[in-house]
Image: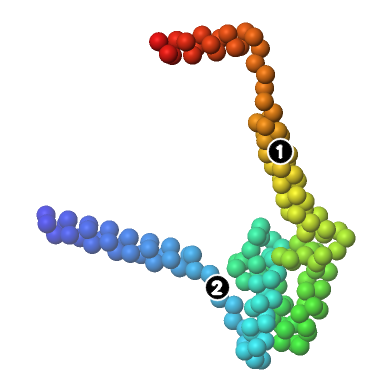
Amino acid sequence: MMRAGICKALAAAVTTLWLLVMMSSASATPVDTYEFKSAANQQRALALAHQLRCPQCQNQNLVDSNSPVAKDLRLEVYKMVDAGRDDAAIIDFMTSRYGEFVLYKPKVERKTYILWLGPLGFLVIALSIGFFFVRRQRINQAAPQELSEADRQALAELLKRDAE
C-alpha cells in the first residue's frame, strides 16, 4: 500500500520535472553566430543594430527582436560591416528599403520637423497657458472687491453672532 503511494509521488515528480525541462527548452531563443573579421567590426555592427528598429516589431531594435525579419536584417548589417561599408551607407540602405521607421533618431528634414519641434511646441504652449492662469489669478487677488450694502450687513451680523 505504501509502495503504491511512493510510486505515484515519484511518477508525479518525474512528470513535473519533464514538463519543466520541456517548458524551458521551448522558451529558449536561438543565438546568432557570425564570425566577424575583427572585434572592431563586431562592436560597430552591434552598435548599428542597436540604432535600427525592427520593421516587424513595435518598438524593438534589431538586437532585441526575435522576429525572422530582424534576424535577416542583423545578418545583413553584419555582412555589410564586414564588407567595409560605412555606417551612413548601411543606414541609407535600410531606410531606402524600409523607410524612416527603422531609425530611432530620424534625420532632421522638412518632413520630420514636427517630430523634432513638436515637443518644444507643446512645452511653449503649456508654459504660456500656465503663465496666463497665474497672471489672471494674481490680477484677481490684487484687485480689491467692493462689498455691497447687503453683504456688509450680512457680515456685520455674522461678526456680531461670533462675538456673543
Among all residues in the image, which is located at the extreme right? 110
Instruction: Specify the quadrant that holds the C terminus.
Output: top left
Residue at left 17%, top 56%? 5
Task: Tell me which corner region of the image, top left, top right, bottom left or bottom right, holds residue 12.
Answer: bottom left
Residues packed near mark 2 inside 10 Å, few (<14), some (14 to 19) or many (20 plus): few
Does residue 67 show up?
A: no
- Amino acid under disc 1: Arg
Residue at left 75%, top 54%? 120
Q: Is residue 24 left or right of residue 1?
A: right
Q: What kind of element bears circle 2?
A: loop
Q: Nearer the viewer, residue 5 or 70?
A: 70
Q: Nearer the viewer, residue 26 or 49?
A: 49
- Amino acid under disc 2: Pro
Q: Position of residue 113 (x, y in %)?
A: 83, 58
Instruction: Specify the quadrant that holds the N terminus.
Output: bottom left
Residues packed near mark 1 inside 10 Å, few (<14), some (14 to 19) or many (20 plus): few
Relative height, residue 129 to residue 74 (above, below): above
**Mark earlier in primary sequence (1, 2):** 2
Q: Position of residue 153 (x, y in %)?
A: 58, 8
Residue on which disc 1 sits: 135
Residue on which disc 2 sits: 30
Q: Are marks 1 and 2 in contact (CB under 8 Å)?
A: no
Does residue 129 show up?
A: yes
